[in-house]
Image (spheres, helix red, strand yellow):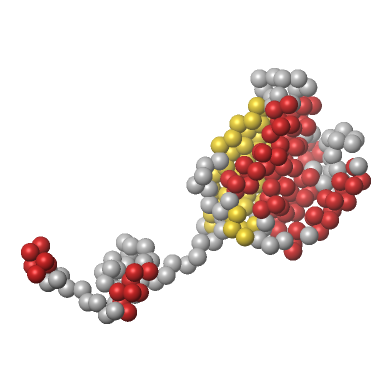
């Protein structure tokens, strides 16, 4: 079974570069990841706390790949928490938050996973994203989870940051570049809705094209009654 999981994971990892990338909601990925893991989280008595605002910008990625990243990190947190707290405990907690940061004038979505588990020893941190390296007991993991997360995140132009202290827990941060928004449509000089307001209005609405094509003109009226008489 362990060999089968390793082969399946390697095949998935090899396909990463060929998967279609689309505008993807981080919040939707998170919600589906929790659906797949919440039964185990509840069974193990882990207190899950999350705060991912719906205003987080989308990223350009493959939904299933990002979901796999989230699940891998959540599972690592579960193992660490269960190792430190085999039974229910007030500190048996996993916190997941999300926000937007700016790096070199570019917006990034940052997802932070913090568990209060056993933590990772300093001498293991340098190896933690290497293939087949695992801090879990034999048979508990393939040693490919964080290696895959690291590879997928880097392929998307992001970063995986890990901070840990034995006996205090681990923080895993995923930074992913926000999807670029389409360029704004410039205002048309002959648009009666926009002329004189180019800096204050969004791009010309579709109605502008109809108005301009019909060659309507704009005339200013001094008073309301004068405007009515112009109809």
Which residue is at a point 68% across and 62% down the rendered structure image?
Answer: 20
Whether residue 166 appears in this view of the structure is no
Which part of the image, by quadrant, shows the N terminus?
top right
Instruction: Please state if 6 lies on the left or on the right of 156 as rendered.
Output: right
* Place of residue 148 in the rendered image (x, y in percent of width and height, measured from the top left): 77, 50
Q: Is residue 32 above or below residue 21?
A: above
Image label count: 0
Q: Is residue 94 above or below residue 213?
A: above
Q: Is residue 6 above or below residue 42?
A: below
* Place of residue 221 in the rendered image (x, y in percent of width and height, measured from the top left): 12, 68
Residue 161 picture quarter: top right
Q: Nearer the viewer, residue 105 or 7?
A: 7
Instruction: Please state if 38 lies on the left or on the right of 6 as rendered.
Output: left
Which residue is at a point 56% across and 41% down the rendered structure image?
Answer: 52
Residue 49 picture quarter: top right
Which part of the image, by quadrant, shows the C terminus?
bottom left
Whether residue 82 appears in this view of the structure is yes
Which residue is at a point 84% across and 56% down the rendered structure image?
Answer: 11
* Place of residue 41 in the rendered image (x, y in percent of width and height, measured from the top left): 71, 30
Which residue is at a point 58% across and 45% down the rendered structure image?
Answer: 27
Residue 168 picture quarter: top right
* Place of residue 141 in the rendered image (x, y in percent of width and height, measured from the top left): 84, 39
> Hey, which residue is sitting farthest front in the picture?
231
């Amino acid at each position: 079974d362990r060999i089968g999981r390793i082969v399946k994971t390697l095949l998935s990892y090899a396909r990463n570069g060929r998967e279609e990338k689309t505008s993807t909601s981080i919040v939707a990925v998170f919600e589906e990841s929790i659906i797949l893991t919440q039964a185990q989280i509840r069974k193990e008595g882990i207190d899950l706390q999350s705060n991912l605002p719906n205003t987080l910008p989308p990223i350009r990625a493959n939904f299933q790949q990002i979901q796999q990243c989230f699940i891998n990190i959540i599972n690592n947190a579960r193992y660490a928490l269960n190792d430190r707290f085999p039974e229910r405990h007030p500190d048996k907690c996993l916190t997941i938050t999300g926000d937007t940061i700016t790096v070199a004038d570019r917006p990034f979505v940052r997802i932070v996973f913090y568990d209060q588990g056993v933590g990772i020893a300093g001498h293991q941190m340098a190896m933690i994203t290497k293939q087949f390296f695992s801090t879990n007991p034999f048979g508990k993991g393939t040693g490919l989870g964080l290696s895959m997360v690291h590879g997928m995140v880097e392929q998307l132009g992001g970063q995986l940051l890990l901070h840990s202290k034995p006996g205090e827990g681990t923080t895993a941060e995923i930074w992913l570049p926000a999807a670029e928004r389409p360029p704004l449509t410039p205002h048309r000089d002959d648009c009666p809705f926009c002329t004189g307001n180019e800096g204050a209005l969004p791009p010309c609405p579709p109605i502008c094209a109809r108005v301009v094509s019909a060659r309507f003109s704009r005339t200013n009226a001094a008073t309301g009654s004068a405007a009515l008489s112009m109809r």
